[in-house]
Amino acid sequence: MNGKTPYEVPTEMREFAEKSVDQARKAFDGFIGAAQKAVDTAHGSAESARVNAQDVTRKAMSYAETNVAAAFDLAQKLVKSKDLTEVMQHQSEFMKSQMAALQTQLKEMGSAAQDVANKVAETAAKATKAK
């Protein structure tokens, strides 16, 4: 035989393979770094959204408490009513006040939801710039 092993890889082929592996490793490292940043950003956005969602939930619970209290007040007035005219008057007043309260509550909840969306968008924009 000529002294070469039959499975010897040419030097050029070996260098090409080493460069390819190095490039693949660098690309993978870059991908992992970007993925870690994305996870950190998502965690920050999720935490911000969680805090803001808690605020909205507290507001909704407050509205529910107010609305239930108003319903109990109406029930008390109805029980004490002397006649059907007074019942109808209390019911009418209740409906007017509840419709006004509902409009206010819906407006405030819409505003709160918009604030949450804006804060999440700002957080995501800041995270994107930081990359």
Image: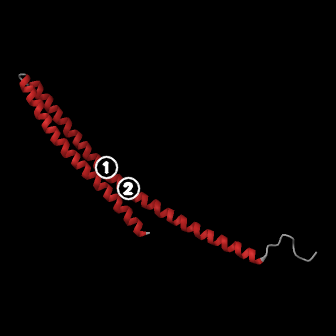
What residue lies at 36% left-to-right and 62% top-to-bottom? Answer: 123
Exactly how many numbered labels are in the figure? Answer: 2
Identified by mark 1, the residue type is: Gln
Q: Secondary structure at mark 1?
A: helix
Tell me where residue 81 appears, x and y as whole percent. Answer: 8, 25
Tell me where residue 77 appears, x and y as whole percent. Answer: 10, 29
Q: Nearer the viewer, residue 89 or 35?
A: 89
Can you tell which mark lies on residue 64? none
| Residue at the outermost right position | 1
Mark 2 touches mark 1? (CB < 8 Å): no
Identified by mark 2, the residue type is: Glu
Image quarter of residue 23: bottom right
Q: Which residue is mark 1?
A: 54
What residue lies at 35% left-to-right and 52% top-to-bottom? Answer: 50
Q: Which residue is mark 2?
A: 47
Left or right for 23, reference 58: right
Q: Nearer the viewer, residue 49 or 27?
A: 27
Q: How far apart, in angstroms, are the residues tagged by discs 2 and 1?
A: 11 Å
Precedes in sequence: disc 2 or disc 1: 2
Q: Secondary structure at mark 2?
A: helix
Image height of 35 relative to 85, above or below: below
Tell me where residue 70 appears, x and y as whole percent. Answer: 16, 36
Image quarter of residue 31: bottom right
Looking at the rendered image, the quarter that the N terminus falls into is bottom right
Query: Label 1: few (<14), some or many (≥20) within 10 Å?
Result: few
